[in-house]
Amino acid sequence: MNRSTAINATDAISTYILAKDGNRPQLMKHAFAGDCELEMVVKTDAVSFPSSAKGLEQITEVLITSFGAQYENIRTFCLSRPNSDSPSHFRCDWLVGMSARQGGAVRVGCGHYGWYFGSDDGRVKKLAIDIEVMCVLPLEESEPIMQWLAALPYPWCSDIQVCESIPAIDALRPIESFLRPREKNGAALV
């Protein structure tokens, strides 16, 4: 695919996930515009990222190169799909699991993606990432977590599929609480 080829929203998101999870920075130019922007809101101390980045090179460094240097066995899931091929904006929840290259601790996190697409070629013009929850578990917990993540439909999955098969590990309860529909948590819908 060359830079002038248009891409639809689903393919742009899938290409980003493939680039991030597989540590393939060369794929980012197929999904993101050259003048793209990144905004991040991190609501946990378990992981750190800069609050913003501008331009394809800087965003690729933050989301792919630096991230891939710290983590491996990365599996990212978008928990809904765009309703059309070319929306101007799409928001979805996400789930990620990975292990640290140093020490092997497992991290499982979730939050929201806000995707903004260019009208000219469909590439991502802006990505807003909210990291709501990030659970850090010891290496001993990695096998059931990695088996769970490997069994989920990738990279598109539903929160229901995630919660139906989540391992019964107390440290994952914040993930389950975030992803369970509000009525299943006993909270009143407003």
Image (cartoon, rainbow, N blue to C red):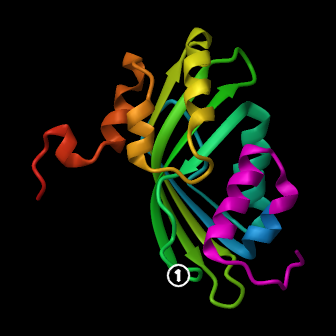
Q: Residue at x 38, y 45 (%)?
A: 160
Q: Position of residue 165 (x, y in %)?
A: 44, 31
Q: Quadrant of the N terminus?
A: bottom right
Asked if the stretch drawn in magenta spans residue 12, the answer is yes
Q: Position of residue 66 (x, y in %)?
A: 76, 42
**Rendered image quadrant of residue 4:** bottom right
Q: Nearer the viewer, residue 3 or 41?
A: 3
Q: Position of residue 19 (x, y in %)?
A: 77, 53
Residue placed furthest toward the top: 140
Asked if the stretch drawn in magenta spans residue 46, the answer is no
Asked whether, in this view, residue 79 is left or right of residue 188, the answer is right
Total number of numbered labels? 1
Residue 122 to residue 76: above or below: below
Residue 47 to residue 23: above or below: above
**Rendered image quadrant of residue 140:** top right
Q: Nearer the viewer, residue 120 or 15?
A: 15
Q: Residue at x 51, y 30 (%)?
A: 46
What amino acid is labelled 1 in the image?
Pro
Callout 1: SS: loop
Magenta stretch bounds: 1-27
Asked whether, in this view, residue 121 is left or right of residue 10, the answer is right
Q: Position of residue 146 (x, y in %)?
A: 61, 26
Q: Quadrant of the C terminus?
A: bottom left
Q: Classify 10 Å Cα crowding around label 1: few (below 14), some (14-19), many (20 and above).
A: some
Q: Residue at x 79, y 44 (%)?
A: 22
Q: Residue at x 58, y 83 (%)?
A: 86
Q: Pointer 1: what residue?
A: 87
